[in-house]
Image (cartoon, coloured by chain):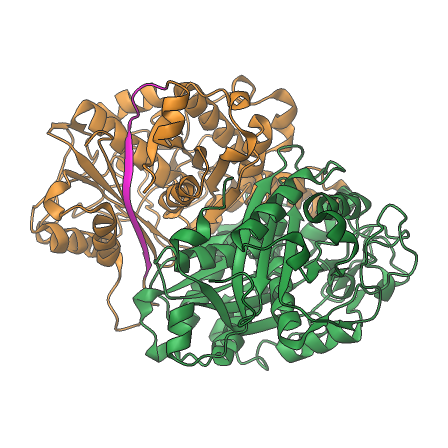
Chain colours: A orange, B green
Amino acid sequence: MTRVLVTGLGVAAPTGLGVAAHWSATLAGRVALAPISRFDASRYPVSVAGEVPGFVAREHVPGRLIPQTDHWTHLGLATAQEALDDAKIVPSDLPEYEMAVVTAASSGGTEFGQREIERLWSKGPQHVGAYQSIAWFYAATTGQISIRYGMRGPCSVVCTEQAGGLDAIAQGRRMLRDGARIVVVGGTDASLCPYGLVAQLSQGRLSTVRDPERAYLPFDVDACGHVPGEGGATLILETAESMASRGAGDPYGAVLGYAATFDPPPGSRRPPTLEKAIVGALRDAGLRPRDIDVVFADAAAVPELDRAEAAAIANVFGPYGVPVTAPKSMTGRLYAGGGTLDVVTALLALRDQVIPPTAGTVRQVPEDRIDLVGRHPRQARLRHALILARGYGGFNAALVVGDANA
Amino acid sequence: MIGERHPACGRDVVVTGLGVVAPGGIGTAAFWRLLTAGATATRTITLFDASGFRSRIAAECDFDPAASGLSPQQIRRMDRAAQFAVVAAREALADSGLHTDGLDPSRTGVAIGSAVGCTMSLEEEYVVLSDGGRQWLVDHSYGVPHLYRHMVPSTLAMEVAWEAKAEGPVALISTGCTSGIDAVAHGAQLIREGSADVVVAGATDAPISPITVACFDAIKATSPNNDDPEHASRPFDKRRDGFVLGEGAAVLVLEEAGHALRRGAEIRARIAGYAARGNAYHMTGLRPDGREMAEAITVSMAQARLNPEDIDYVNAHGSGTKQNDRHETAAFKRSLGEHAYRVPVSSIKSMIGHSLGAIGAIEVAACVLALQHQVVPPTANLSVPDPECDLDYTPRTAREARLDAVLTVGSGFGGFQSAMVLTRPGTGKGGR
């Protein structure tokens, strides 16, 4: 079976613009949540979020594309460029049909869309701009990446809310197995505009706490929902043959296993299926529970969701059987950007043999029986990491990454 | 060649059930009647007052959610696109003879495509929350409880998963106008790789609302032929002037071949090949050479182990824009060679419009029906051929023909090009 290696990373997250900034802020346990600055959110019950600091579109996006694309796509283009540079890939050197692009999308170009729909309803249909048709739709980022780099292989967009990033990596793995040599896999989100935030409120899962340090406390007795964030990450998946042919250096790691499941509807007597996803991903990786050295949790910080996740982890790994961490407590939940960012963070943890912290959580819910890595990073021997993600509505995904040489 | 490895390593995927919600009639039977009659379902927009718009025509579904069997709560929480998808999924599951209670939920998956998700509800709610576009800081106190479900298109897959009682892999695939083909292909892939035995796969879109009509107005992509809506969708005709927006859904029950055989299911068709390519050229523009679509066609035929002359019918993208019609005509010539001039081609968008992400799945459904009934649906409204489009586009009248293998293609924003080959069971074409 084709080995699926990760050879490049790119990040635009509240914890930092760029992989290095993100990783150092994450290890420092720095909570990157703050009052929303993109618009005046003070009138809304939720006003704290994670925003990408210091992002200036013209430094990362070709000038012509800036007015044609939403902030969500700007972040996607920036992370794709960093990941390709990191992998030292020159797209024009590679066969055009063997480069593929996958992104996860959660809600599309929300801010761009709100501006255009406002023009329509306040001024009339003639005032809707020509770029609405290509900026708002969920496939915009994949299309722009494909065009920017001349990547003419398969293009895909997966929408499974917060599970999307892991599902997109799995889609990229399918494309490599199908003959692609590199796949750009990205996930970003940027729904911090008034309509985007208000739509998120109706989930009933957002924290209304206004103190950024106390707003998002997964697995804590005071957990009261999560905080939204913007940004995400892009990874380059590549085959060993492709790496050898272009003389690439060591990869960050390998994608070893994956499974996705879906929960029964509310009110069903059937149990949730996250545990099955974990078991499926381990089986797919050919690993046993004891081979997993760290779990990156979905960490919804909604009490019943935290209990369900903790139970699934404890059932597979035993009580306190594996270190569990939730660095997304520092960024907020990034929806389509969350999965790829967690995988990037997990690969950096493997590289540096250190588990990043969970910020904020002080008093863990005792019946969870999970070994939560608290506010300080923990040194550990790390061979394999399991990343979990749950998308609103019942989507579950589990992905295993590990040392490429193991 | 990328893509060719597929069939060797996997399991066969067959279609055992169909459900369609389309303009001109709800249900597979009404859909096929419309297509074989060569009748058109395009008309002046009734879903909203379109009088201030450049293009005021569309192919609308005469859809009554209650009459289609949805419950009051389903109707309240679901966007029109979700309603279409669930009704089509229900028909497909019934048609397949599968009983969801007898299925293993963990081996059942869902793959739904959509280009614009729940836009219609998102827009309706926006209008209220912004008080008619007057408030940038929209008023959250007017938010409906399921607003977030409209914001994330994954809701469409969720609703179908609930209908099918699926607990295996579930996803919404959103690649613009190729979403439908790509979602069916994703479902087939889940079966082939062993992640599921049954996948409820298809696509849905309900884009006939002011914002979507306005955004196609802005780029003059849609037909302004408001005075003659029944004849406005004219793919391959010299007088064509843009596509006519449509809406609808098609859902298929895909099954691992052995699973279907063991339960004695009627096998309608086999998904024999699929490939997708990007033109990496322009978000909305197409180069006239059709190179990337041709590549997708060539790879999908190779996967099916078929040669160009084995293809008995080509279901064209045929949107009715000049650049598309020429692009795809070139792609057929490039991939099928001399056979391109002999094989019947047609565009059902001439009859039911272009329903964005949904149409790819609706066209797959049309291909399954064409194989089953051995009939090529026509291209309606084609009476003055564009001299640059010199293939046999099956003008105006359906045609009986021996169909063992058919090809369907899609082309869309982002530069995405997809091709799928379906074969008739028992013909030895495209299967092992």
Going 67% across and 34% down the picture, which residue do you hit? B282
Q: In which quarter of the view is residue B98 placed?
A: bottom left
User: Does the magenta portion include B367?
Assistant: no
User: Does the magenta portion include A256?
Assistant: yes
Going 27% across and 52% down the picture, which residue do you hit? A302
Q: In which quarter of the view is residue A141 placed?
A: top right
Given residues B248 and A152, the one toward you in this image is A152
Given residues B190 and B332, the one toward you in this image is B332
Q: Magenta residues?
A: A248-262
Given residues B197 and B273, the one toward you in this image is B273
Location of residue B274 in the rendering, given as x and y in whole percent from the top left corner: 54, 52
Q: Visible in this render: residue A129?
A: yes
Q: In this view, does B286 lie to the left or right of B249?
A: right
**In this picture, is A206 found above or below A264?**
above
Going 10% across and 44% down the picture, which residue do you hit? A290
Q: In this view, does B263 lie to the left or right of A127?
A: left
**In this picture, is A131 found above or below B80?**
above
Location of residue B114 in the rendering, given as x and y in whole percent from the top left corner: 56, 55
Location of residue B4 in the rendering, given as x and y in whole percent from the top left corner: 49, 46
Total numbered circles: 0
Q: In this view, does A86 lie to the left or right of B238?
A: left
Location of residue A335 in the rendering, given as x and y in whole percent from the top left corner: 40, 43
Q: Visible in this render: residue B145?
A: no
Q: Is the magenta stretch mostly helix, strand or loop?
A: strand
